[in-house]
Image (cartoon, rainbow, N blue to C red):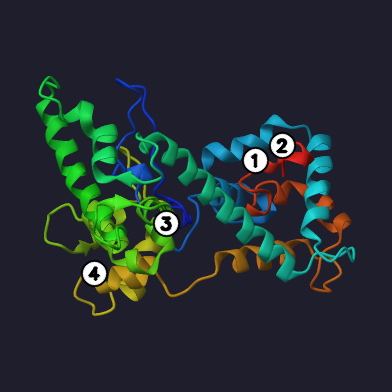
């Protein structure tokens, strides 16, 4: 099972405390846009816990939000969320209602993330973010002549070049000044059709260690798992080797080219909100009428608090009037 999470907004920028609280470049491995078919490195076995679901839809850090609440608080606040999901107020949560709610939560996450960074980068407050504003805020300190670590300086220059390529692709009119929509495409390229090629290109660059423009089996596995001395290979790694040979490497030449990588990380128009809604209903719908009551959901509250239905867990820590 792949330890990489398929997450809609995987390319979020992080703010560092160095110098003037300058943001780290987008290319750090943990922040890159990188899609996988599997959602977590946990074994997906609900009979032994919901760690897979929690990490898949929260990330490890966000999943810890649940621990801040008592079971009673969680159930109370989840019940209020259920009332909001029930759009027609008939007492049942349908697949359509749950899917719509999850999609709404996903979009709100993206909007909030973009707005946060927009405020950091729109330095002249003109309602646009220029390439110069982004470059100076993100890289100015690291590229300054007084920054003495030449290895790091070389690394940041490479990151700058890659960010510039992504910025220019997101900048549809070519004026090097991003509108809010263009900036969203820069931060979340996986959400935009015209940015899909950059997602593939960056994925290949991150995993391809020998620089041949291809991903061989060892590079593929090495991006997911590095064995400690004396450590055996887990079963999920063996499964991934089989996946590579049987399903990823379509032309059986021992490596993945850009087209094969695209098939791997962008496997068609997958509606993950739909998939998650079906999963939650399947696991929670005890009478098998293909819709959920509040009682059914609250009985399984420990599954829902870790899903996208609760906006990455954040809704459970907010008052009802904040939702």
**At x 12% / y 56%, what residue is drawn?**
211
Q: Earlier in the sequence, mark 3 or mark 1?
A: 3
**Residue 119 screen position, x and y as percent:** 44, 36
User: Mark 3, mark 2: which one is toward the viewer?
Assistant: 3
Visible residue check, residue 42: no
Crowd around label 2: few <14 · some 14–19 · many ≥20 (10 Å): few
Instruction: Assess whether mark 2 and mark 1 are in contact (beta carbons under 8 angstroms).
Output: yes
Give residue 258's mark: 4
Pointer 1: what residue? 314
As drawn, 47 above or below 25: below
**Secondary structure type for disc 4:** helix
Give residue 181's mark: 3
User: Quick check: 150 left or right of 198?
Assistant: left
Give residue 318's mark: 2
Tell me how far mark 3 sits from mark 4, CA to CA.
27 Å
Q: Earlier in the sequence, mark 4 or mark 2?
A: 4
């Amino acid at each position: 099972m792949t330890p990489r999470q398929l997450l809609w907004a995987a390319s979020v920028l992080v703010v560092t405390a160095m110098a003037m609280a300058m943001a780290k470049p987008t290319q750090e491995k943990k922040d890159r846009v990188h899609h996988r078919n599997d959602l977590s490195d946990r074994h997906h076995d609900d009979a032994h816990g919901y760690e897979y679901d929690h990490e898949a839809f929260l990330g490890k850090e966000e999943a810890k939000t649940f621990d801040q609440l008592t079971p009673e608080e969680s159930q109370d606040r989840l019940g209020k969320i259920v009332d909001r999901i029930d759009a027609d107020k008939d007492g049942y949560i349908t697949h359509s209602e749950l899917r719509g709610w999850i999609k709404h939560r996903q979009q709100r996450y993206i909007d909030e993330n973009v707005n946060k960074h927009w405020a950091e980068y729109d330095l002249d407050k003109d309602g646009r973010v220029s390439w110069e504003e982004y470059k100076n805020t993100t890289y100015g300190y690291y590229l300054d002549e007084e920054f003495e670590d030449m290895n790091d300086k070389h690394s940041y220059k490479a990151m700058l070049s890659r960010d510039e390529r992504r910025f220019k692709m997101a900048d549809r009119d070519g004026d090097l000044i991003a509108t809010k929509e263009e900036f969203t495409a820069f931060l979340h390229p996986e959400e935009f059709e015209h940015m899909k090629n950059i997602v593939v290109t960056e994925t290949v660059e991150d995993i391809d260690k020998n620089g041949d423009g291809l991903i061989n089996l060892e590079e593929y596995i090495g991006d997911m798992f590095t064995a400690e001395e004396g450590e055996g290979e887990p079963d999920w790694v063996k499964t991934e080797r089989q996946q590579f040979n049987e399903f990823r490497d379509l032309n059986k030449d021992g490596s993945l080219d850009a087209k094969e990588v695209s098939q791997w990380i962008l496997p068609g128009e997958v509606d993950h909100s739909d998939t998650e809604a079906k999963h939650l209903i399947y696991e929670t719908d005890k009478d098998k009428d293909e819709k959920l009551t509040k009682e059914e959901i609250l009985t399984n509250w420990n599954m829902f608090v870790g899903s996208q239905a609760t906006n990455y867990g954040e809704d459970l820590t907010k008052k009802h009037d904040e939702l």
